[in-house]
Image (cartoon, helix red, strand yellow):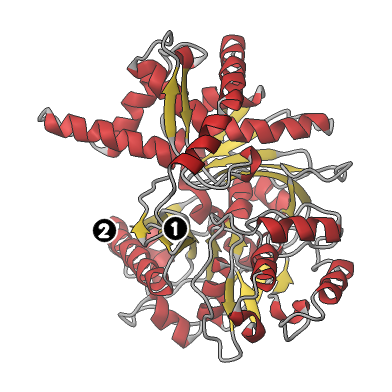
Amino acid sequence: MTAATVIAEGRAVLGIELGSTRIKACLVGDDPNDVLAVGSHEWQNELVDGVWTYGLDDVWAGLQSAHAALVADARARHGAELTSVAAIGISAMMHGYLAFDERDELLVPFRTWRNTSTAAAATELTDLFGVNIPLRWSIAHLHQAVLSGESHVADVRFVTTLAGYVHWQLTGERVLGVGDASGMFPIDAAGADYDSVMLGQYDAAVARSAIAAPIRRMLPSILPAGATAGALTAEGAALLDPTGALQPGAVFCPPEGDAGTGMVATNAVAPGTGNVSAGTSIFAMVVLAQPLQRVHPELDVVATPAGHPVAMVHCNNGTSELAAWVGVFRRFAELTGSPIDADDAYRLLLLEALDGAPDAGGVLAYNQIAGEPIADLSEGRPIVVRTPESELSLANTMRALVYGVFATLSLGMRTLHYEGIAIDLMQAHGGLFRTAGVAQRLLAAALDAPVGLAESASEGGAWGIAVLASFSAAGGGDLAAYLEKRVFAEGGSTVVAPDPADVAGFTAYLAQYEAGLEIQRTAIDALPAARSAEHQGASS
């Protein structure tokens, strides 16, 4: 069956992921490995009155733009008009805070995962529950609003994530996949629902606060991977495609977070597997075969889309500062009369990093644009710094910038070693890995573990959620078996083992990096950040 026929007959499956800097749509065929069309829309968060946010109008404008681009791509590639699909999946950046009142009106601007103003709430909840509650989790945002006496708390009736919000508007269903839900409130050991004991503990803790309803009533219902999570309504179809061409009726899989779709896109959902996702944030996920021995502030315990427990090391800052430097070099190329596109600039500059000294020659790069809990940084101050005897070169600078992307992640990953959790292989995905053999090799050095890169990794989370939608359309079952037999049976993965010289070099770099974090803390005090609204550029 031709791609044009699959599209015309409404057999294709659509996946959409709202990332930090790009909304991407991916259309797959009967075989989830068959990518028929893609579309994307660039967007950026804003720092408004000290809060990282996206406007909901921008959410819908971006979704419509990405869908329109995908429709145009399907037309250009296959001569087919996309008017219906078999299934749809929605994914988005995890955590954060979207709170609505009884009239379904947004109470405060969307507070994203990037905000670090919830330290008091996270500490109090960690002590209450006996599990680590990170600053970015939805319950930390809600509880901080309670502690701060914010007036909107009394009106909160529903709290969800960005993926849950978009899914709700398209289907009318207030549900969430178990992976995304596990970043809202702790879930039970079976991975089936929120932890009932902790729900009761929270209700008791806030009994005299302004909160009007039990916390469970405010949270979306949880569905596992493979479940049917509603269907595209006529109103939802019009929201996604204002032209009226898209018809309602497509079934939906449960909405998921970008961590879950990253696990799917790298075939890392079974116990003992792991992956690293590098974008505006960077995080590592290791699916646990047994519970952690104790609470670690560096580790979240979340879940795969199928409900298996996962140890997650999440860093708020990933590739944005590296991207800013690539932009500087691209501008220089323009001034010389030889402009260069972004992909070529990344390729040349990343390859140059391989010529740098294993320890980056004494050059250090701190990529913190926002606060970084793992490094105990309340705010971000991006810095490139060196001692007088260091060797400043393009190669060393580029290696330092790439090391800077992985440094805080490496600090957090040490905790897994202390827990006795061995890492046999980490699968990687994200735009940083498009240049073959560079970021993959340096990540292997940072983790001192082999790093694999699947052929499908370049499609990222939009493809991952399309796979989950295909899984639901196929009736569900065992997600790990589905991925192994249906999706990755013939797909190749290139594995790079850590080079001993690179490992020694990164170890030396990280020791200096850790000592130099005090520079960041001093800069936070010495250089106060502007609190007025500003537009923050970033790229993944």
* Residue 155, horizontal then vertical, whole percent: 63, 86
Q: Quadrant of the image for the C terminus?
A: top left
* Residue sitting nearer the eye, 219 or 138: 138
Vertical arrangement, residue 367 with respect to residue 465, above or below: above
Label 2 belongs to which residue?
Answer: 76
Instruction: Name which residue lies at 63% across and 45% down.
Output: 373
229 left or right, relative to 306: left
Per the image, label 2 sits on a secondary structure element best described as helix
* Residue sitting nearer the eye, 103 or 229: 103
Q: Residues within 10 Å of mark 2 (few under 14, many from 20)?
A: few
Per the image, label 1 sits on a secondary structure element best described as strand
What amino acid type is highlighted by mark number 2?
Answer: Ala
* Residue sitting nearer the eye, 149 or 367: 149
Res. 40 visible in picture: no
Which one is in front in this view, the residue at disc 2 or the one at disc 1?
1
Vertical arrangement, residue 316 with respect to residue 5, above or below: above
Q: Quadrant of the image for the N terminus?
A: bottom left
Label 1 belongs to which residue?
Answer: 26
Q: Residues within 10 Å of mark 1 (few under 14, many from 20)?
A: many
Residue 277 figure quarter = top right
* Residue 150, horizontal then vertical, whole percent: 61, 76
